Amino acid sequence: MKSSVGMPSSISKRDWEAALKAAFGFAQFRAGQWEALQSILEGKDVLSILPTGGGKSLIYQLPSFVFETGLTIVISPLIALMKDQVDSLTARGLEAAYCNSTQDELEQIRILSRAATGKIRILYVSPERATSRSFLDLLPKFPVRLIAVDEAHCVSQWGHDFRPEYRRLYTLRNHLPASLPWVALTATATDRVKKDISDSLGLVSPVGVQGTYARPNLRFQIRFPQSEREKEADLLSILEYSNFRKLSSGKAIIYCSTRAKVDSLYELLKKSGYKIGKYHAGRTDSSREKTQDGYSSGKTNVLVATNAFGMGLDSPDVRLVLHYQVPSSLESYYQEAGRAGRDGKPSDCILFFHPSDLNVQNFLLSKEANYKGGDTLLSHVKSYATSLECRQRSLCGYFGEETEPCNQCDICLEASRTESGREAYIERERIKSEKKREKQSHEFSSEEIQNIEGLLSEYPARFGKKIVSSALRGSKSKEVLRRRLDRSSFYATLSHVPEESIQLILEKWLFEKKLLVKGQKYPKLYLANLGKNFSGKKRKSEIADQKSPSTLKKAKSSSPTKVLLNELKNFRDRTARRRKWKKFMVLQNPVLARIAEQMPDSLEELKLIKGMGESKVAQYGAEILKIVESHRF
C-alpha cells in the first residue's frame, strides 16, 4: 500500500482549464465536471450523476494527463466500452490499457506488470477481474491514485442493468489506503439508487454532483401501433422520412428486447436497402467488435441492438433512437434515448408502446437472479407512456428534477389537454393508419405495372423511389422537370394512383430482388433483368442534361470551403486507417469544419480552434496547415 499515490490539489482552476484545452481541446469545463474534479483532488469520494454525453469520463481521465505518476483504475462493465475508451486515450497520447478475457494470460501479465511499474496511467478492468483473488493480491503493488466506478447504476439491485459483481467492489477497500478517493459515475439514478450505490461501495460522505436531466435538443414521442405489421410499417416510414439510406443523414439506433427481434428487424431493413448492423450478446466478441467499429466509423448508420449496445458510445451524430419494444425501466429508457443528439443538434427519441411488450419484459425480468422491483419499474414505463404530461418533464420528474414543458414532444404538440386527450390521440393515430393503409392498398393492373417497368427501363439506375413515383404521378416539381422526366411517354401514366402505393410496390420489388439498387450514397433503381451493363452507356437526354446551363453553373459554383473540408476529411481518414483508429479519434467533423472555415495560417491560430488541443496540433498541425495553404487564393 505504500506505493499508492496521493492526489495533489494545489493546481489552480486556470491551469486545469489549460490542461483541458491541451488534452481534449475544450476551453472550459461542462456543468458538474469541475466540481467533481475539485472534490477528487481534495481526496473526497464523489457520486457523479451527469447525463449521457455530459463528459463523465473526463472527470477521472484528466488528472492522468496532468500528474506524471499514479494509476487510475476504472471499473467498466463492457469489453467494447473498455476498448473504445483505451483507443481514444491512446490517440490523445496517454498510456492506457485494459485487462479482460479477450487477452491471453501472457498479455494480461504483461499489462499488469506495466501497471505496477507506473508505465500505464489508466487501467480498465471488469468488476469480475477487479474482485478476483489474483487481482486483489496485486492491488497493493500498484501506484493507485484513484478508483473510478463507471456505469455505477450496475451496483444497485433497485436500478437497471444490475450486475451482482459490482456489489463486491467494496472488497477493494481492504487492499487500498482508506484515504484514497473513489468516484462513482452514472447517467441515471433515483434517490433510492443513489443511496444504494453509496452504501454498497462504502463511499465516505460522498460529494454529490448532479447535472440536469433535461435534453432540450431531443424530441420525445410515443406511438401506439396496433400490431406487429403496423410496427414494421411505422419503422420503415420513419427511416424513409428521415432519409437514413443516406449515410450523411446521421445515425439511428433501434433497440429491441430480444435477440430474435434484433435478427428479424436486421433482415427486414437489410432487404430494404439500409446500411445496417446488428448487436446482441448472442454474437461472438469479434462480430460485436466489427459491428461497433463499422457503426462508429460510419460504414453503417443504422444499428438494431439489444441494450447490450451503447454504454460509452462516442457517436455524437445519432439522430434517432427508436425503442421498437418497451424498455425494462425508465432509467434504461432515459440512458438509451440519451444516446441521440450528443452533439446538441435536434434528434428524435421514439418509443413504440404495445401492452404485449410489457409481458415480454416481465418474462425477461423474471429470469434475472437478484433483481428487485421489476414490476414496479415496468409500471413506471407504462405510466410514462400513457401520461398526458410533457414527455421531457415527466422523465426529469421521475429523477426528482422539475422542468418546464419542452414544447416539442408529442404531448406538447397536441392541441387537446383534456382527460380524453390520450384516447383522442390514439383514435387519430388509428384513423391515420387506416388512411395510410387505404393509400397503400391499390391493386395494380398489368398495364400500370408495365408503365412502372417502362419508366425504370427508360432511365435505368438514374433515380430513386421518390423521383420515380413523382414522375409516374405527373408531378411538376423542380426535381422532375429539371431532369426532363415530363418528356417521357410514361410521365403521369399513374396520376390516379396514390404515391404511397407506388412506393410500396417499389419496396416490394426491392425485397423480391426484382428491383436492384446502384450506389450507396444516392441509391438509384434499376430492374434486375436489365443487368449492370447499362452503367457505361449514356442516353441523349443524359448528355443534354450534362450540358444544361444550370448544371454547368452548379459545377462552377463549388464552394472552396467545401473542397478544403473534403481534403481535410481525406487526410483524417488516411490517418485513421494508418493508425487503425476510428475517425473521430483523430479529428471530429465539427473541428474540421471550423478549420476549413477559419483557415488558420500558424500553429498558434490552429490551437485557438475549438477541439484542437496541444496534442492534436503537435500530431497533425503541420500537415493541416500544409493542406490549408494549398487552398489559399
Image (cartoon, rainbow, N blue to C red):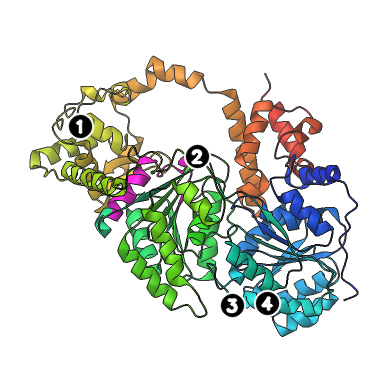
Mark carried by residue 346: 2
Cα–Cα gap, marks 3 and 1 = 60 Å
Image point 55% across, 23% down: which residue? 559
Cα–Cα gap, marks 1 and 4 = 63 Å
Q: Secondary structure at mark 3?
A: helix
Q: Are marks 4 and 2 in contact (CB under 8 Å)?
A: no
Query: Taken as a whole, is the magenta stretch helix, strand or loop?
Result: helix
Cα–Cα gap, marks 4 and 3 = 13 Å
Q: In the current view of this chain or complex, which residue is farthest to the front?
A: 419
Front-most of residues 38 and 403 = 403
Q: Is residue 320 visible?
A: no
Mark carried by residue 164: 3
Residue type at tag 3: Pro
Image point 70% across, 27% down: which residue? 599
Question: Which one is closest to the eye, mark 1 or mark 4?
Answer: 4
Image point 56% across, 50% down: which residue? 297
Front-most of residues 284 and 177 = 177
Which residues fall within the magenta stretch? Answer: 231-253
Q: Position of residue 393 (x, y in %)?
A: 49, 47
Residue type at tag 4: Arg
Q: Are marks 4 and 3 in contact (CB under 8 Å)?
A: no
Cα–Cα gap, marks 4 and 2 = 40 Å
